[in-house]
Image (cartoon, rainbow, N blue to C red):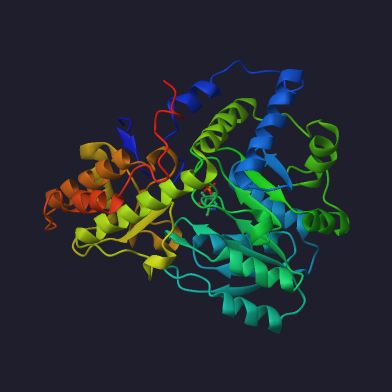
Amino acid sequence: MEWPFMTAASGPVEVTDEVLRAQSRPVLYHYDPAFVDFFDHTSSLLKQVYRTQYDVVILQGEAVLGLEAAAASLLDPGDKVLNLVSGVFGKWFELYVERHGGQVIELAVPYNEAIDPADVERTLDRHPDVKVLSVVHSETPSGTINPVAEIGRIARERGVLTVVDTVSGLGGEVLSPEEWNIDVAVAGPQKCLGGPPGLSLMAVSPAAWEAMQRRKPPLRSSFLSLLDWKDTWLEQRRFPYTPSVSLIYALESALRHVLEVGVEPYAARHAAIARACREGVKALGLRLWPARESIAGNAVTAVHVPDGITDEQLRGHMRSRYGVMISGGYGELAGKLFRLGHMGKAAHPAYLAAQLAVLERSLADLGFPVKLGAGVGAALEALGDWPPGGCSEGRSRRP
Ligand SMILES: *Cc1c(COP(=O)(O)O)cnc(C)c1O
């Protein structure tokens, strides 16, 4: 199979040449003082991107490791977890809770909707013994976001710990664990941050550390243990096991890029491209998947598969004829929607215009009535000034 010309998928995303070059640097021994310094420096960049004073932990595995580690490290058998479900990843967290002995109380909405904070309030009042609340910030398979700041405030008022999957949220929106009352946040480099997959980027509040230490017994000597990282890295600058040296190089480069642009302008780029993308999609006569635009996220734009065409036909055609890879529906959303991705490097007018152009051409090839250029035109019209906030492209993309 030929490799694609362009990837505008739901993650992993395309990474910049700079990130690739960083990843190809010599592999250092992890206790070389230069690597220990570099890991420390990378952690401090992550703190700045998270806008947090909490401890950050970089687990050496794809973001699902961080999510399972949160459940495994926090939960004692029988602990009640209010799991908010507005999509595939929200539902998935239930498996981790149950595997690690927790008891799930579910608050679910249809997968094109967002959680209503008033429902969270009511549910927590009905179940005062809930220990942990879990919620997905950016539900990538649905292209939706949940109001995590409001939910966090409600949980904090009731002394409930929050675990937030912001794997595709960090970078695409301005957030802070302190401001949003998040106790354990989990992000991934391979979405809005524009890095490669393979790491879990976590922020852990003092209250979450205490809860982990109160667990009977505290989870230690495990790949899933967050306390292992506190005992070794955070307290003694030792590693519990060998870190993924090359991925740390790539992560440092991706985080540095976000900070060079600025956390707020970087998120504003994602918001501007997402808004323009929705205008383009609507101008083509297609229907957005989220129930309302106010809950559409900045990571991907999810679109109903139009009548008369299958998802496989459309995405297959875009990939095989034009070499453009976008994403389909995931889990129970398979076949119902397709997703245009605009994270990281793809949060850019050139990627937006190119994928919409190929989408239009593919729809026309498959007999769906479109006026070529309608989607691209509407998107570019909606774009306004680029980049938002004004700083130039060249400053941060060195050749
Ligand atoms: C990508 C993603 C994950 C991690 O899932 P992978 O299958 O390992 O990529 C978790 N949660 C959300 C919301 C995601 O977007």
Question: Can the viewer see residue 335?
Answer: no
Tell me if residue 335 comes above or below residue 365 in the rendering: below
Is residue 349 found left or right of 14 in the rendered image?
left
Name the residue: 56% across, 32% down.
Answer: 256
Is residue 2 found left or right of 121 in the rendered image?
left
Q: Which of 312 and 240 is in front in this view?
A: 240
Percent position (x, y) of residue 199?
61, 39
Is residue 323 found left or right of 92 in the rendered image?
left
Tell me if residue 200 comes above or below residue 243 in the rendering: below
In the rendered image, which quarter contains the N terminus? top left
Percent position (x, y) of residue 362?
18, 47
Question: Can the viewer see residue 178?
Answer: yes
Snapshot quadrant of residue 124: bottom right
Percent position (x, y) of residue 24?
53, 19
- Extreme residue in the top direction: 26
Name the residue: 55% across, 40% down.
Answer: 189
Percent position (x, y) of residue 297?
44, 58
